[in-house]
Image (spheres, rainbow, N blue to C red):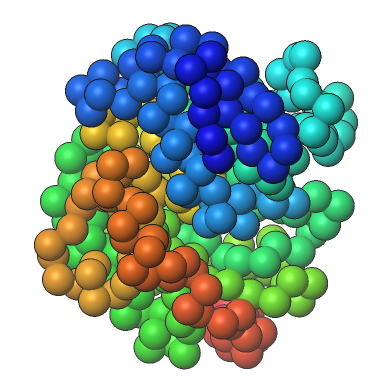
């Protein structure tokens, strides 16, 4: 990617005009729009992989994180010729599959990228199973402890997983699976089983209560979010929060060390981490969950 004094970036043969390149998007970090596009180019090989062939929802902040925002599902208009869409119902979703499209969205101040669990043209069968640990408190010092307990439970059941920060306050546990083998409905049965077990074994820490007002200070094991038509903060998406955090996969040793918080990985340091560790999600092979589901089905009969 190269830039000129006229605030035009050139990428893969496409020129993308940058409006208000000096506008501060994260004022406290001094991240202007042009700096943001540079950071997106660093994230691109990782972020695109987890948005490719998904229905994309972005959150736009035209005046930076302190200004008003809005969700965008429909492709903004006018769009350059290199931008492609996937139509579902009456919505034309942007297909985020290349760097020029990512930079074009970045210029529109799309500061967050949320990808659907279902893949384009494959509404029934996901390629991962996800548990979302959602704190009820704005600051939750126990979130890594909670994530570690979930990881230990899955490991005891013969399931390998990867934790990732949401980039906000929560942590998601990702289990890659083979596409086409399991449906969302079957995986929801597994999620309910795990959530109920955790809430029963650690009632001072976990809950499966859906209503936030009834959760107190407990961490919600959200197994219902993982479903067709719903989205997740994509791995490696920036978040429009103070500190410019980035949703970042972690090693289980990092979770259990107690040294990290979801806000510790951000636009100004994520590049170095990615150079050192690559995409940690790739470190877990697709997990066979059929036997575990059959076991749970037998227990519930």
Residue at image point 58% right, 72% down: 176
Does residue 112 show up?
no
User: Of all residues shown, which one is farthest toward the front?
Assistant: 5
| Image position, residue 225 (x, y; %) | 55, 48
67 over 176 or under it: above or below: above
Residue sitting at x 31%, y 57%: 272
Where is residue 68 shown, x and y percent of the image?
Answer: 43, 9
Residue shown at 64% from the left, 24% from the top: 16
Of the pair 276 and 52, the residue shown nearer to us? 276
Based on the displayed image, in which of its 4 quarters is residue 83 positioned?
A: top right
Quadrant hosting residue 230 = top right
Q: Is residue 227 left or right of residue 253?
A: right
Image quarter of the C terminus: bottom right
Question: Of residues 209 and 17, which is closer to you in this image?
Answer: 17
Would you say residue 291 is visible in this rendering? yes
Query: Residue 208's spot in the image, x, y percent?
Result: 40, 53
Residue 149 position (above or below residue 156):
above
Residue 91: x and y in percent read 81, 27
Q: Residue 46 or 122: which is nearer the viewer?
A: 46
Q: Is residue 277 left or right of residue 6?
A: left
Q: In the visual, does 163 lie left or right of 16?
A: left
Assign the N terminus to one quadrant of the image. Answer: top right
Q: Residue at x 43, y 68 (%)?
A: 278
Q: How many marks?
A: 0
């Amino acid at each position: 990617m190269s830039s000129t004094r006229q605030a035009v970036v050139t990428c893969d043969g496409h020129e993308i005009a940058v409006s208000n390149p000096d506008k501060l998007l994260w004022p406290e970090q001094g991240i202007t729009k042009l700096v943001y596009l540079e950071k997106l180019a660093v994230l691109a090989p990782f972020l695109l992989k987890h948005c490719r062939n998904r229905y994309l929802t972005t959150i736009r902040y035209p005046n930076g994180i302190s200004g008003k925002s809005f969700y965008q599902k429909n492709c903004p208009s006018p769009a350059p010729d290199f931008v492609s869409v996937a139509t579902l119902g009456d919505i034309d979703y942007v297909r985020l599959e290349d760097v020029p499209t990512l930079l074009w969205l970045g210029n529109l101040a799309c500061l967050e990228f949320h990808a659907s669990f279902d893949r384009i043209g494959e509404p029934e069968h996901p390629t991962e199973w996800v548990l979302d640990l959602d704190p009820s408190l704005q600051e939750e010092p126990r979130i890594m402890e909670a994530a570690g307990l979930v990881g230990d439970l899955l490991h005891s059941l013969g399931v390998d997983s990867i934790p990732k920060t949401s980039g906000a306050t929560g942590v998601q546990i990702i289990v890659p699976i083979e596409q086409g083998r399991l449906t969302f409905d079957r995986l929801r049965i597994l999620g309910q089983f795990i959530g109920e077990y955790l809430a029963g074994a650690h009632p001072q820490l976990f809950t499966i209560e859906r209503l936030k007002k009834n959760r107190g200070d407990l961490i919600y094991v959200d197994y219902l979010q993982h479903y067709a038509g719903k989205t997740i903060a994509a791995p490696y998406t920036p978040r429009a929060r103070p500190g410019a955090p980035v949703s970042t996969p972690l090693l289980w040793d990092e979770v259990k060390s107690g040294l990290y918080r979801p806000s510790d990985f951000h636009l100004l340091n994520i590049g170095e981490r990615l150079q050192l560790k690559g995409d940690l999600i790739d470190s877990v092979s697709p997990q066979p969950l059929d036997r575990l589901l059959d076991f749970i089905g037998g227990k519930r009969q």
